């Protein structure tokens, strides 16, 4: 299984660049019979889902639940979740509170442990208490998971766009 992690404040033009770049990389994963895994949310998860679909990579969308009931997501994440569900072959329900940053990090760590590879959309900056990308990269590496860092030329972040990584 291959997962994507990355900054939650990626500029719209960066998401377009990434979707294109991911499509080529994910086509190789599809040929190898892998499956993509993404936690629902706006921004990077949708770019990953679209690229996976275009590349022919089967995808699993991870949906948060609270007490075995799908959790209420923020408005933009709710719309993104709908698109990701349509792009996915499977849905995995995972118990965590999407409004709790620490719960999201723990959920991401559990999901990464099920993966052989992680594509990290990361500019190399350290975790700042909001963005968890650096932490998840270090976590994956410390657990022997292959990490591929991707930061294409022209990629940018928009500070304040979104505080949490997807």
Image: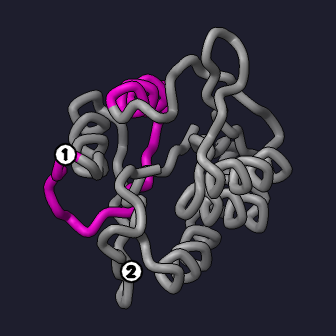
Residues at discs 1 and 2 in contact (Cβ within 8 Å)? no
Tell me the CA gap for discs 1 and 2: 24 Å
Q: State the residue in front, 108 or 34.
A: 108
Q: State the residue in front, 140 or 98.
A: 98
Q: Where is residue 71 in the image (x, y as percent from the top left)?
A: 65, 28
Residue at the spot 28% in from the left edge and 28% down from the top edge: 143
**Magenta segment range?**
102-129
Q: Where is residue 99 in the image (x, y as percent from the top left)?
A: 47, 34
Query: Dot 2: within a 10 Å radius of its alpha carbon, few (fewer than 14), some, or many (20 or more) residues?
Result: some
The secondary element bearing badge 2 is classed as: loop
Disc 2 target residue: 152
Q: Is residue 137 left or right of residue 24?
A: left
Whether 117 is drawn above or below 90: the answer is: below
Q: Residue 98 carries which label?
A: none
Whether residue 112 is visible here, answered yes or no, is no
Q: Is residue 127 left or right of residue 97?
A: left
**Residue 18 in magenta?**
no
Q: In this view, does 124 lie to the left or right of 53?
A: left
Q: Position of residue 110 (x, y in %)?
A: 44, 23
Q: Is residue 131 left or right of residue 29?
A: left
Q: Quadrant of residue 45?
A: bottom right
Whether 121 is drawn above or below 115: the answer is: below
Disc 1 target residue: 129
Sequence-wise first label, 1 or 2: 1
Whether 44 is drawn above or below 69: the answer is: below
């Amino acid at each position: 299984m291959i997962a994507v992690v990355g900054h939650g404040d990626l500029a719209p033009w960066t998401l377009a660049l990434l979707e294109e770049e991911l499509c080529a990389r994910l086509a190789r994963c599809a040929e190898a019979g892998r499956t993509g895994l993404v936690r629902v949310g706006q921004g990077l998860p949708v770019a990953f889902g679209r690229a996976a679909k275009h590349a022919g990579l089967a995808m699993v969308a991870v949906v948060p639940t609270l007490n075995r009931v799908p959790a209420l997501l923020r408005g933009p994440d709710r719309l993104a979740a709908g698109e990701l569900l349509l792009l996915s072959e499977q849905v995995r329900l995972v118990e965590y509170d999407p409004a709790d940053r620490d719960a999201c990090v723990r959920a991401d760590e559990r999901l990464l442990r099920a993966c052989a590879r992680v594509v990290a959309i990361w500019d190399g900056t350290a975790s700042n208490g909001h963005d968890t990308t650096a932490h998840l990269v270090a976590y994956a590496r410390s657990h022997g998971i292959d990490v591929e860092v991707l930061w294409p030329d022209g990629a940018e972040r928009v500070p304040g766009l979104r505080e949490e990584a997807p």
